[in-house]
Image (tube, coloured by chain):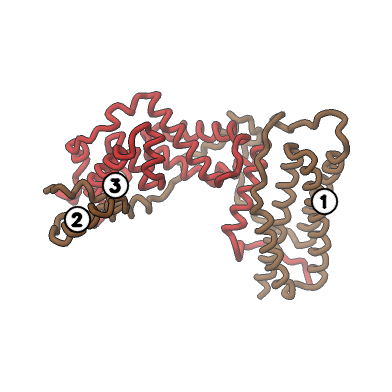
Amino acid sequence: MAPQALEGPLTRDEPTVAADAEAADTALAASGDGSAFERLYRTHVARIHSLVRRMLDADEADDLTQDIFVRAWQKLPTFRGESAFGTWLHRLAVNVVLARRKAVGVERGRYRSDEDALDGISGRRETPEMTVDFEEALSRLPDGARQVFVLHDVAGYRHEEIARMLGVVPGTSKSQLHHARMALRKHLER
Amino acid sequence: MKDQWTDRLSEYLDSELAGGDRTALEAHLATCGECRTTLAELRRVVARAKSLEDRPPRTDLWPGVAERIGAGKVVALPRRRLSFSVPQLIAASVALVLLSGAAVRLALEPPREPVDGGPRGGVQVVSWPGRTDAAIAELENALAQNESRLDTATVRVVKENLAVIDRAVAEARRALAVDPNNTYLNRHLAETMRRKVELLRRVNAIATAQS
């Protein structure tokens, strides 16, 4: 038989193989392999950039995404493999974003629950032609509601975790989440 | 219009309402169309949030990251697409394993001086998560089922060379038992197992394509 060409997509068990490859790349990157770290970067950059873009202004997203990956490179030797690399990276990214928010003072009014401010982003319900993209509406939420909504409904953190991250009580996180949802329901595509 | 239950709808939706309140809210929902509508909308908001798609940045940020971490190689890596023959791939895999295996044997010898930690001296290496063994076992089972689709010469070469890789893995593990924090050894083990996974995966893909 002639040599067989090794081409074509994987045919089975791709998630397991991908997880294994990522574990290997994490080990290699932790020992200083830049190429392995680049593969990790390319796998996760969309998720991290989207997180940053949703929690901060879009014009900061590129710089902060780079900061997050640089920080990840520096901290990789402390990664113990107790969770998936992606989970660890996402949590690190949240911490960097929250620190950034604190540094620039955008947390002012963080716990504002003024529904008039939330209603200010409405538009679709009364005037369908003024449809605002859901992501755009999300970016216009008050800061506190925005970050809780992203962390809870988009990223999947629990209120107790969010409360610890933000230094508030879980009840505040729940309240902010509800206000965010109430505002955003006006921007659902119909 | 808001009533006393409107602000509890998110908690209800997230199953975070305690028993008594939950029962009372459900009784209210049975009679309040507006709250039912609001609840349905909130449910759609949650579903919409979960369906948001992640988008990569418009420009490639890797060169900036690479520069800051001193990765040296600032090259956009295209998705790998191999077009080697089976014997070529095996030869390449085994050559690399044997080459680095020599360094493992050196590492097994009593060190004349403390072993260098690699590019980041003193680095704490991550523990091997153990998922690789399971992945390899599964791929080997698949190969056992698929090997009838390959010609016997190819199967023989594959098996002989998988044995070589296995010996390299065993050597690396023995060395790591002596020096578990050795960066080079951890890296070598990860890379060797990665090559084995890659080889098994590709051979299985070929075999499957034959059917």
Q: Name the residue beneath numbered marker 1.
A: B95
- Image location of residue A47, percent across then percent down: 46, 45
Query: Which chain gets the red colouring?
Result: A
Q: Do the residues labelled 1 and 2 touch (CB within 8 Å)?
A: no
Q: Name the residue beneath numbered marker 3.
A: A133
The residue at the point 75 percent across, 38 percent down is B184
Q: Do labels 1 and 3 share a chain?
A: no
The subunit letter for the residue under badge 1 reads B
Chain B display color: brown
Dot in front, 1 or 2: 2
Q: Which of B169 and B99 is in front in this view?
A: B169
Spatial CA span between label 3 and label 2: 36 Å
Q: Name the residue beneath numbered marker 2.
A: B24
Say if B157 sits above or below A187 in the image. below
Which residue occupies the extreme left position in the image?
B1
Say if B147 sits above or below B95 in the image. below
